Image: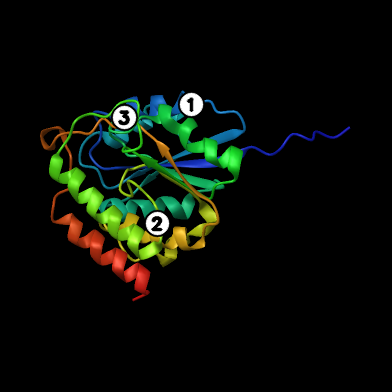
């Protein structure tokens, strides 16, 4: 008699890290706590040339990850993402920042559209009734609404939050070799390509515990220009 149980959904949790020694172990511990029926995780950490003790604290806890990739020098988050995609083995990829702004306890919500409805992309949204959201910068929220509106206009979609960290997507939708951006515009490029190829797209509410600039937040207003330029280039194919 053969086992008729379905094969688990394999998910690569991709963690780019740069100088995150203070938070990355706690983050990886939270990831390791996630148990979702029908889902199996691999955890790929890409150290982006950190200058602090990030590598040392991760290497001290090998049970918390599947693979650690060390880049010899800083390539920016986009470069780390490309390297991570090249080694990812899961059916799906889920981006996870190495800080504690986003909570792995939301993985169940993100994966529900995959396991129940066969979703190809699930975008975590901080704007559709999250359980908890830390009050953060007004201009960040306004800028996010602006770029989300433009993305929806270009792609005829109804996203509410295209620049949260949590984007879960079928790995076969994207080849890392086709990603041109290594800056803040990369997520817009990736989502533009994936959304055009996906059949089923969902959003799921997630909590958000945003850092202040004093706590290490890196994004600045000038990065919006890179995002807008990449959205237009990706949509127009130039």
* Position in image of residue 135 (x %, y %): 19, 30
Q: Residue sitting at 42 percent across and 66 percent down?
A: 178
* Position in image of residue 216 (x %, y %): 16, 37
Q: Which mark sits nearer the N-terminus, 3 or 2?
A: 3
Q: Quadrant of the C terminus?
A: bottom left
Residue 34 image label: 1
Quarter-of-image position of residue 1 = top right
Spatial separation of the CA atoms under disc 1 and disc 3: 21 Å
The residue that mark 3 highlights is 57
Q: Residue sitting at 32 percent across and 46 percent down?
A: 161
Element marked by disc 3: helix
Residue 191 image label: 2
Q: Establish if 141 lies above or below 212.
A: below
Label 1 packing within 10 angstroms: few (<14), some (14-19), many (20+) = some
Q: Nearer the viewer, mark 1 or mark 3?
A: 1
Label 3 packing within 10 angstroms: few (<14), some (14-19), many (20+) = some
Farthest-out residue, left = 214
């Amino acid at each position: 008699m053969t086992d008729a149980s379905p094969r688990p959904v394999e998910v690569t949790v991709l963690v780019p890290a740069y100088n995150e020694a203070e938070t990355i172990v706690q983050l990886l511990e939270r990831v390791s706590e996630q148990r979702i029926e029908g889902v199996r995780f691999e955890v790929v950490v890409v150290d982006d040339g950190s200058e602090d003790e990030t590598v040392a604290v991760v290497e001290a806890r090998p049970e918390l990850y599947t693979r650690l990739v060390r880049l010899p020098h800083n390539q920016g988050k986009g470069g780390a993402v490309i390297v991570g995609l090249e080694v990812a083995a899961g059916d799906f990829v889920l981006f996870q920042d190495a800080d504690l702004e986003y909570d792995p306890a939301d993985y169940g919500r993100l994966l529900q559209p995959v396991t129940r409805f066969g979703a190809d992309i699930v975008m975590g949204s901080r704007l559709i009734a999250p359980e908890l959201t830390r009050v953060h910068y007004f201009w960040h929220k306004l800028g996010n609404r602006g770029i989300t509106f433009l993305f929806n206009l270009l792609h005829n979609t109804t996203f509410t939050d295209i620049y949260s960290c949590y984007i879960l997507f079928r790995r076969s939708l994207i080849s890392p070799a086709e990603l041109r951006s290594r800056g803040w515009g990369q997520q817009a490029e990736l989502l533009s390509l994936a959304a055009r190829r996906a059949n089923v797209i969902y959003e799921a509410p997630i909590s958000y515990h945003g850092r202040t600039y004093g706590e290490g937040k890196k994004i600045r207003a000038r990065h919006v220009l890179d995002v807008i330029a990449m959205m237009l280039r990706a949509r127009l194919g130039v």
